[in-house]
Amino acid sequence: MKMHEVRVQQRGAELERANQLAWRIAEVAADNAPIDPEAAEMAVNRVIDNAAVAAASLLRPPVAAARAQALTHPYRPGSTVFGEPEGRRYSPEWAAWANGVAVRELDFHDTFLAAEYSHPGDNIPALVAVAQHKQVTGADLLRGIVTAYEIQVDLVKAISLHAHKIDHVAHLGPSVAAGLGAMLRLDPETIYQAVGQALHVTTATRQSRKGAISSWKAYAPAWAGKAAIEAVDRAMRGQGAPSPIYEGEDGVIAWLLDGPDAAYTVPLPGAGEPKRAILDTYTKEHSAEYQAQAWIDLARKLRTLYPQVTDPARVESIIIATSHHTHNVIGSGAGDPQKYDPKASRETLDHSIPYIFAVALQDGTWDHVDSYAPERAGRPDTVELWRKITTIEDPEWTRRYHSNDPVEKAFGGRVEIQMVDGTLIEDEIAVADAHPLGARPFARADYVGKFKKLAAPALETAEIERFLGVAERLDLLEPTELPGLTIQAKPGYLDSIQVPEGIF
């Protein structure tokens, strides 16, 4: 890896293109490095994972609304939309929009956390949609996926957006543009302009993940993918972007991030170096914010060892000592009363570690539907236990959260359960069981199992097996086979939800 130093240009000075971050990203995307076999294997896992969580979300109102929008834009050659028959094709940016919302809605696919937060699987819907429309090969699509993951992970390692209340999709727009550039084998100049445009139009505030969290949390990454497709389209037609987009004196860093004196070091692969960043990412076993994954696993363990912790009458208090991020974003440190509100939205509850820990303690499991049901959230004994749970920041867990050492990096913490009878129960967990360093790391069989379980209510068994047969041959697919990277719902399955009409 090469370290690229990023600084805001001085007033009146010219910053050579070769020293601009957007140009360096474009060079990486245009570099025809060999595909690492492990990275290729993981890309297949994530294509399967995306389809799994999309299948489980097909009937949810935000997904149905996005799908309804896409279906008003038929197009040829076009792209497929999750839930619809493979033979029906739609404009690629709208297909990417609908499929992106389906993938993101349940907060149940992959994650990477460092200086910033991300769900790199959000890159895939846009890449698949364009691959189908442009009729590229599976090998080309694979190249685009590993490139998009590389760029997003490298940006997330170096540049914090949330510290300035900018939403994490500001790294997603450029990564999708870079992945599309790699997949379509565009020249560095075109990719450079597309990256700049994509970044410019995908910067927004983090209010979508604060307070009363709405369906826009699922829409924001899909918007970034759609916007990036349109940016690449404009760049291919010769249209340029604001420049330097990152380093300009009125650019993103100077006014939205660390300011005129900012300095970042962004790791990027050198020429000919395989792109392996996808191997640094990790998926979710449970449908909840990633920082909650380990806590669900610890709660399941504690319930088995100490059944008394499920009874609020026997529990005095529960204190979760964890990282700055977990405490301040999904813990009591956020100061959001909605995180303790039984009538809060699903989107808010999956960002409340007090709620998640309480339910996981009592149920010993986690379900993407049942664990968020209004009757589950409103159960009196759960509410009583839930409101006895608070979080605090522990500097050591914050340090481990930000560690660059993968062996040391942690997303958990320590819990202290003070019982009414004076007993103190303590335990800790560093990473989720499904994490590569966890008790049961996810492998291909786990991804396939997750897909079969989540897809069973929505897809016929034959359709489940058909999709897996296509996805597992990703690198060998011919252009005519790429439309098979979709899922068709059971007959009549989608009829149960009615979507209000809009403009389209």
Image (spheres, rainbow, N blue to C red):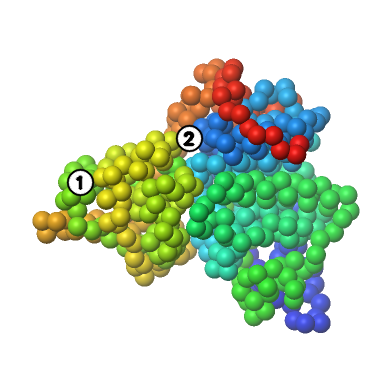
Q: Is residue 152 left or right of residue 385?
A: right
Question: Residue 55 or 331: which is nearer the viewer?
Answer: 331
- Residue 345: give x, y in percent of width and height: 47, 46
Question: Residue, x 37% and y 54% (percent of image)?
Answer: 340
* Residue at the far right in the pictured view: 238
* Quarter placement of the N terminus: bottom right
Residue type for callout 1: Asp
Disc number placed over residue 295 in the picture, else none: none
Q: Which residue is mark 1?
A: 311
- Residue 251: give x, y in percent of width and height: 73, 70
Residue type for callout 2: Tyr
Q: Which residue is mark 2?
A: 447
Question: Residue, x 62% and y 46% (percent of image)?
Answer: 219
- Between marks 1 and 2 in the image, the one whose residue lies nearer the viewer: 1
Q: Marks 2 and 1: in contact by CB < 8 Å? A: no
* Quarter placement of the C terminus: top right
Find the distance from the CA under tag 1 to the CA under tag 2. Answer: 34 Å
- Residue 268: give x, y in percent of width and height: 64, 61
Question: Residue, x 68% and y 24% (percent of image)?
Answer: 86
Q: Earlier in the sequence, mark 1 or mark 2?
A: 1
| Mark 1 secondary-structure assignment | loop
| Mark 2 secondary-structure assignment | helix
Q: Specify whether residue 31 is in view.
A: no
Question: Total number of numbered labels?
Answer: 2
**Res 409 → quadrant:** bottom left
In the image, is residue 321 above or below residue 308? below
Question: Residue 26 or 411: which is nearer the viewer?
Answer: 411
Q: Is residue 408 left or right of residue 240?
A: left
* Residue at the far left in the pictured view: 421
